[in-house]
Amino acid sequence: MSAVEHRYEVRSRQQRWSGRIFDVVTEEVTMPGGGTAPRDIVRHVGAVAVVALDDAGQVALIRQYRHPVGRRLWELPAGLTDVSGEDLAAAAARELAEEVDLTAGRMDVLVDLHSSPGFTDELVRVFLARDLADVPPERRHERRDEEADLQVVRIDLDEAVAMVLAGEITNASCVAGLLAAARARDTGWSALRRADAPLVR
């Protein structure tokens, strides 16, 4: 006989702060055994990231300054899903063009991840982009703020995986995307999902 799972119910909700990318709320949640407990939550708009893999087996990585950690991190081309009505694959294609000046003839889903579920509901879909081509110079996006300083580097996928395992790459979606891409490649791309696969929330 299986135990009955506790149903966590929200008894009250107080919005602490609201912004363009995320809101901060406090929810009073029922706990197993009786009683409630407050939980502070960052409600996030969501994001996409892209493992752009070329015909030579290299991935396009960016090195970008991230102020909360005070240093530059290795990352995938990525961005927010904050454009109304834009599907996730289109958002991924937009970020690919804006951040690394590439287009993709083929886009598949690699992995979905909750970036830090202890405090945020942020959900990131990581795509695999192949059949890459350069965006013509006259159509390239003008990068601003931290993006104006980002460096774009192509690295062999296996070398990038080694950087993950050595602790040199720590961005969550980058770690997950690179490991998933290597696994997908080694199994003949058989586990990839279609670009329009439903997102489980």
Image: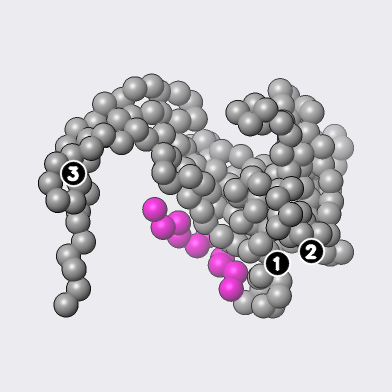
| Residue in view at x 74 percent, y 54 percent | 166
**Disc 1 versus disc 3: nearer the observer:** 3
Give the image quarter of residue 66. top right
What label does residue 141 carry, if any? none
The residues colored magenta run 191-201
Instruction: Compare residues 155 and 136 and report the one nearer the observer.
Output: 155
- Give residue 65's position: percent from left, percent from top: 72, 31
| Residue in view at x 51 percent, y 46 percent | 115
Estimate the spatial distance between the alpha carbons at disc 1 and disc 2, rounded to whole Å.
7 Å
What label does residue 30 carry, if any? 3
Question: Of label 1 and label 3, which has the lower sequence position?
Answer: 3
| Residue ID for mark 1 | 182
Instruction: Compare residues 143 and 156 and report the one nearer the observer.
Output: 156
| Residue in view at x 49 percent, y 30 percent | 21
201 shown above or below 45: below
**Is the Cβ of the residue at disc 1 closer than 8 Å to that at disc 2?**
yes
Query: Amino acid under label 3?
Result: Thr
| Residue ID for mark 2 | 158
Q: Residues within 10 Å of mark 2 (few under 14, many from 20)?
A: some
Report helix, strand or loop for mark 3.
Answer: strand
Report helix, strand or loop for mark 2.
Answer: helix
199 in the magenta segment: yes
Q: Is residue 22 left or right of residue 62?
A: left
- Give residue 187's position: percent from left, percent from top: 67, 78
Question: Of label 1 and label 2, which has the lower sequence position?
Answer: 2
112 shown above or below 146: below
Estimate the spatial distance between the alpha carbons at disc 3 and disc 2, rounded to whole Å.
46 Å
